[in-house]
Image: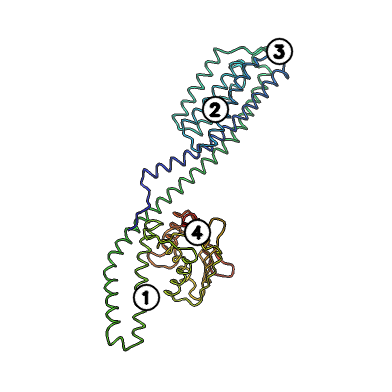
Amino acid sequence: MAKTATKTPAKQSAIAIEYENSAGHKNMLQLIQLRWLAVFGQLSTILIVMFGFGIHLPLFKMLVVLICLIGFNIASHLRWHERVYVTNGELVFALLIDVFSLTAQLYFGGGTSNPFAFLYLLQVILSAVLLEAWSTWIIVAITSVCLAGLSLFSEPLPLPPNETGGLSHLYVAGFIICFILNAALLVFFITRIGRNLHARDAQLADLHQRAVEEDHIVRMGLLASGAAHELGTPLATLSVILGDWRRMPEFKKNPELLEEISEMETQLQRCKSIVSGILLSAGEARGESAVKTTINTFLNDLTKEFTSTRTIVSFGFDNQIQEDIPIVFDTALKQMVCNVLDNALEASPDWLRMEVRRQEDSLIFTVVDSGHGFDPVILSRIGEPYQSTKGRPGSGLGLFFVVNVARKLGGQVMASNREEGGAIVQLSLPLSAIML
């Protein structure tokens, strides 16, 4: 039996962590964008306060903090442009840099008497959305310590002579601006971060579904392996009997019986190839019996074998590939295409057509029939096991195997109904998966 392609729990967990880190990368990019807005906002606020309201600020010190924040953001952009996975600890570090830079600016800008101290809430809420629970509490503790420290230690903010301090109109105006800024940034960025997290959850759900399907393939592979061993002896016995019949004088003198024996031998050989094909398809996409050939030779042999072993009234084959590309194929690849053709033949025994073409770096198989088409429910669940209207136990596995083998090769399967009746199944495979 071919080696199975199932994922162990450890591998599944590793892939799940990769999806988590991938979502973290998107969130880190959101933080980098937010930091650029913070730089612009801080610079604008400093200039407005100094030249608009006539309040003297330690400009040099605040610009040094701003330059450090810009340098950190440039370094972050360069780092996360090359690396696509971000861990929880790296997100914590990035948020702490934002907290410390805000603390430094508030220290030089009046401490807790500065209404922009409420921007700490933005950091806490972002940490609650982005980080694990224990990390969020660390951010809460550090921001609380920073806020308490600012209430005790900070450079006083010199107000104009007409400002008496307390709840002055400047403080109220700053408070309103801070609230609007907090609200706008939270709505904008948490919406985008939520979209990233939703995409991550969808990817994890898809990963889980694929793991379940591949586990089913393993079980089918074991069943196929057992069936192959069990059927091997009776099929071999039948082959020997048919060979003996062909040599018997009673049959040699009867051309009709010889013709029937030839047909029985053909169907017997087909049974053997079907068992082998299912065995490989249920195991892994690339079997052990790989053969070097060219794409046109492969297609011609496949169509010749298909038409000679099936009863077809009209079969059209359109090969649009000009360049005869060297490839490596195995029984699983051939069985995958034959499964699509068999399904179409069962739905449309009078007419069937297959078109093969190259589209950029992909090989496109298009199978068209004139049957009743797919039921809308079945069409929406193509590739899931036991999705069939044939009403037989075990039916619906043909396209299930096709979809999973195509997926392992990096391809995909699409199905639709024709307006004039019948169905279209399109199988797309990357040439890199089969080319020499």
Marks 2 & 3, CB-CB < 8 Å contact: no
CA gap, disc 3 to disc 4? 72 Å
Vertical placement of 52 versus 227: above or below?
above
Give the number of the mark in front: 3 or 1.
1
Residue count near mark 1 (Cα–Cα under 10 Å), binned few <14, some 14–19, many ≥20: few
Vertical placement of 134 versus 230: above or below?
above
Q: Residue at point 67% right, 16% down? A: 168
CA gap, disc 3 to disc 1? 101 Å
Estimate the x, y position of residue 63 in percent, counting from the top left: 63, 20
Q: Earlier in the sequence, mark 2 or mark 1?
A: 2
Task: From the image, tell me which residue sits under label 3.
Answer: 160
Q: Earlier in the sequence, mark 3 or mark 4?
A: 3
CA gap, disc 2 to disc 1? 73 Å
CA gap, disc 1 to disc 4? 30 Å
Marks 2 & 1, CB-CB < 8 Å contact: no
What label does residue 266 carry, if any? Answer: 1
Q: Secondary structure at mark 3?
A: loop
Q: Secondary structure at mark 1?
A: helix
Q: Secondary structure at mark 4?
A: strand
Q: Amino acid at mark 1?
A: Thr
Q: Amino acid at mark 2?
A: Gln
Q: Secondary structure at mark 2?
A: helix
Look at the image and name its color scheme: rainbow
Task: From the image, tell me which residue sits under label 4.
Answer: 413
Q: Amino acid at mark 4?
A: Val
Q: Earlier in the sequence, mark 1 or mark 4?
A: 1
Q: Residue at point 32% right, 60% down? A: 223
Residue count near mark 4 (Cα–Cα under 10 Å), binned few <14, some 14–19, many ≥20: many
Task: From the image, tell me which residue sits under label 2.
Answer: 123
